[in-house]
Structures are given as structure tokens and as C-alpha cells.
Image (cartoon, helix red, strand yellow):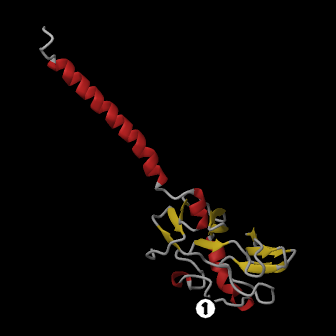
Amino acid sequence: MTDDQVDNSRRRLLTITTAGVGLVGAAGLAVPFAASMAPSERARAAGAPVEVDISNLEPGQQLTVEWRGKPVWIIKRTPEVLDLLPDMDGRLVDPASESDQQPDYARNPLRSIRDEILVLVGICTHLGCSPKYQPEIGAVSFDDDWKGGFLCACHGSKFDLAGRVFAGVPAPTNLVVPPHQYLSDTRLLIGEDGAVT
């Protein structure tokens, strides 16, 4: 082969190799760029919706997630608790949830989309403490006829297992129900209203 002749097979190999290296480099740049488009942890805490897997939530259990820097409780209520909730009405400030502590789709005595799943912001409406989940039923040190609920140890406010405030305690209103929706039977999105299912 003379100096003036071109080795086409070698030229093709160099072209393919160069194109391949270019594609790998472009992909290497695209991955971090695409990842930067997702909201940061700081943005999520500031208000971006939070997706929660509730597939392992057992009856009576409480799951806590953070949304907008606040604890959000997700509780799977037992059939026994659901049966007892109407008995609480005479002891509550707002048993029918007529005040504005919940979206319209949770403006009902159970304060939920699905009867068994309760979603609440875990902050007392008195001075912002975080009440403790007290699921036991029966006489307890702070109530002889306790049907389960939440006790704020800071000043003694009590809420039932629908987040409704008891009469005669410092907290003025029910616990807040955040905007939420079901993405599926086992996935919940906190922070965004959606279709009622």
C-alpha cells in the first residue's frame, strides 16, 4: 500500500471508536444533569409532596414521615377503633369536623378518605408540641374511659383516633389533616390533593 492509498477499514474503526467515546461521554454528562432536576431533600422538606409505602402498615400501627418539616402520622385503625369512634362524639369539641382543619374529602367523622387509614399532622393545635400516640383502650392514668387516641403531655390536650379534640382541654381545634391522595392501594402521596378513591 502506498502513502496515497487510504485504509478504509482502519478509518471506519477510528470513526466508530470516536463516536462510541462521544456517546459514552454524553451519557456521562446526561445522568448528573437529569438527577439535578429532581427536588433536593431541602426542597422536599420545604413542601414537595412525599410518597409513602403503606403496604407493611399493620392494624394499630403508626408510621411517621416528614413533610414541610413537620411529622405526619399515618395510622391503620382497627375495626374495634372504628366501631368506638361514634361513642366519642359527646366528649368532643368538633365531632363532625366542621372546622377547617382538613380538606373537604376528609370532612367527615372519621376524617379520612379510607376508613381504616388516618393521616394527620402530628402537631398539637395548642402550642405546637407533638402528642403521643396512645392506642390502648380502657382506663389509663389520664382518662377512665379511653378509647385510644393522642395525648399531648405538654398541657394535657387529648385527641381521639380521628384527631378530634376533646372538650375541656387547652387545644382549641382538631389536629390538621394534610392534603393527600392514594396513588394505589399501598402508596400514599402526602402534600397533594387528588381524586378520592
Residue furthest toward the top? 1
In depth, the one of 74 and 149 nearer the eye is: 74
Nearer to the camera, 168 or 77 = 168
Identify the residue at the far front of this view: 4
Image quarter where the C terminus lies is bottom left
Instruction: Please give the count of numbered marks on the rendered protein.
Output: 1
Whether residue 56 is visible here, answered yes or no, is no
Residue type for callout 1: Glu
Disc 1 crowd, CA 10 A, few/some/many (<14, 14-19, 20+): few
Give 193 or 165, whichever is nearer the viewer: 193
Q: Is residue 125 above or below residue 17?
A: below
Vertical arrangement, residue 48 with respect to residue 162, above or below: above
**Does residue 1 lie above or below 138 as drawn?**
above
The residue identified by callout 1 is 98
Taking the spot 13% from the left edge, 9% from the top edge, the residue there is: 2
Residue 111, position as x, y percentages in the image: 59, 80
- Which quadrant: the N terminus? top left
Task: Give the image location of residue 25, x and y in percent.
Answer: 38, 36
Residue 100 percent across, percent down from the top left: 61, 87
Residue at the location (84% across, 75% down)?
A: 154
Q: Horizontal and vertical percent for residue 132?
A: 77, 69
* Residue in the image at 52% along x and 76% along y: 113
Q: Quadrant of residue 14?
A: top left
